[in-house]
Amino acid sequence: MRSVLAFGAALLAALAACAQPAKVTVDDLMRVRSIMDARISPSGELVAYVVSTPSMAKNAHEAALFVVPARGGEPRRLAEDTKIFTPRVPAPRLRFSPDGGSVSFLGQAGDKPQVFAVPVSGGPARALTSAPEGVTAYEWSPDGRSLACLSRDPAPAEEERRRKDNTYVMRAGVPDAAARLWIHPLDGSAARPLTPADRYVDSFSWSPDGSELVYAAAPVSGFAAQYQSRLFAVKAAGGPARPVVDRPGMNTMPQWSPDGRLVAFVTTNGGTDLMASRGLAVADARGSSPARSYGIGDAWVSDIVWARDSRSVYVLTNDGTFAQGRDMFDQPLVRVVLDTGRAERALGGVNFSPSLSRDGGVLAYRSAASRAMGDVFVRDLKTGRVSKLTDVNPELSGFELGDLTAVSWRSFDGKEIWGLLLMPSRWPSGRKAPLIVYVHGGPGGGFTWGLFPQFMQTVGQVDAYPTAALAGDGFAVLFPMPRGGAGYGEAGQRMIVNSWGEGDYRDIMAGVDDLVAKGIADPERLGVMGASYGGYMTDWIVTQTGRFKAASTASSICDLEDQYYLSDAGEFLGSYFGKPWEAREAYAAHSPIRFAGNVTTPLLIQHGERDQRVPVAQAWKFYRALKALGKTVELEVYPRSTHLYYEPALERESMRRNLEWFEKWIPPGKP
């Protein structure tokens, strides 16, 4: 009898073990799907969305368009015969025709993006535009008879000839061809431009009656153009433009109110540097009175949707009143009442792609939970009822993804610093874990809730650092939010002016010390990693302390002066340090390359071959210095890659190498 009971107990234990979630692998992470866009139909009855799936076989992110009833039901795939525009990851820009009968998107026509439309009832998609240089953005006219599009002028005949005979050369300082606003009639007549060839348009919106368009444009192109944008209005029939908002700084993403009186837009309120908050402002559509700004505590606004009564505006925000402290990992939807300026949280969590039905009663959006990639939801704004419409990654429930929680600590000057802490699933209480510190990009970036916390606020990016797989191996991961980044308002971002690697470094190390003091982190098994500004901080950290047993840096800056001269956005460093010829000591004092001799931590350097934001010369420079000094360092250059790696094969390889690197140098601590 005893042997029977023992056998039964062993069988139950074996069955329980089999039922436990599995350890997630890099290959599992490369199979997760992302929702790239979501849009509700005018009637509020359907929601269209695009799902992106990494394909290792095709080495591409493949997109599929679906519609699902807003009341819930089985999704239907549309436009299977047409490839959705995928410059690196799918960029569909979903819209419904005004009558709701078709869904439109940016699709691939040859090597150019064009607007396609497919009936919601099904059938083949058809191209609505044939712009010679392709379409990058578009909106339906209110009557559905035409499209307003952004497109570049065709290259001059002489340039085309020189490209064909291989005598074309790129000349510094020559302006790019401008993205102009065009009207594309759907009756087959010729498209016509509305804006001049020397005005670089970045966004626009139709007036409700279809007679005018408001657009944001700058007189220059490139990284700095966003801080020189103004708002103009132009008749849809053509003619001279009139100014709507004419002031310094960023004035962009205009959205015309449903009643036609006002224009809401994103603005830096005259600020012209990277740290200026991007808030909400509303202007008289006639341009007859100054714009009114609505402060939400230094919130960065990333999307605007008008309420249908034109009395309030919904905005997606990072930072600010509703995304600071414990909530700084959210991207909430906030409703701003225009008359009073009162702001209230409409949706918590991490949200994207909000859109309203024509009557303003139903809101559709994408939202991501703590250990998820995100799904499509709708909310009835009258009853408050929320419905989940999709489940695009059901298999994630079968994996151990770790436990993600918000944590805080006090830094050297008493400032409260926040971060996210990912612990391995079922980690025994009181047992110390090896800890990997993951520093975000920016400097003004941050982390959110989600399976890939670094990139959840920009949909669809697979992270080069497989934090869920690291947690499955028994590593804890700290995602610190030091001063200089999101979560502390504009004043917090300016705390690292002329001082990269000072207070921000001490904030991060204070977080490590806090976890060590609490018995969570093993002080003998510490690692650090990060990309872009996070790569700069990783380079800096290993030159300032030998506490870390392994480090991985990507797209990283080791020499600030080189970054100013060689980057496509190098001028932004002037906001932090001034001009290098005027502040050489400051640039040198905050450049990791100057302290390369201090490094004792084994370092893996990863960099994109075609990175223009942080040129690959930065990686070679740090590698050669460390190699000459006899340090333990490896460099991997990712072919065809820019500031991020978008090819699934390279994304997988980067994740695999990072996991392998930390397993090699830091013994994993499995529970």
Image: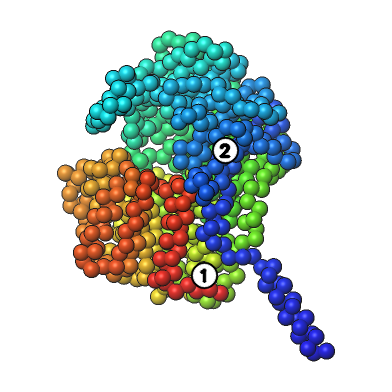
Q: Which mark is residue 37?
A: 2
Residue 51 % position (x, y): 59, 42
Residue 38 vs 628, above or below: the answer is: above
Q: Which mark is residue 474?
A: 1
Asked whether residue 527 is in view, the answer is yes
Residue 614 % position (x, y): 31, 47
Looking at the picture, tell me which residue is in the foreground, 381 or 117.
Answer: 117
Residue 433 % position (x, y): 49, 72
Q: Is residue 367 left or right of residue 74?
A: left
Rendered residue at 70%/39% (across/down): 75
Crowding near pointer 2: few (<14 within 10 Å), some, many (20+)?
many
Looking at the picture, tell me which residue is in the foreground, 242 or 647.
Answer: 647
Looking at the picture, tell me which residue is in the foreground, 70 or 650.
Answer: 650
* Name of the residue lying farthest toward the bottom: 2
Residue 275 % position (x, y): 36, 42
The answer to which image quadrant residue 601 occupies is bottom left
Q: Amino acid at mark 1?
A: Gly
Residue 311 vs 213, above or below: the answer is: below
* Name of the residue lying farthest toward the front: 165
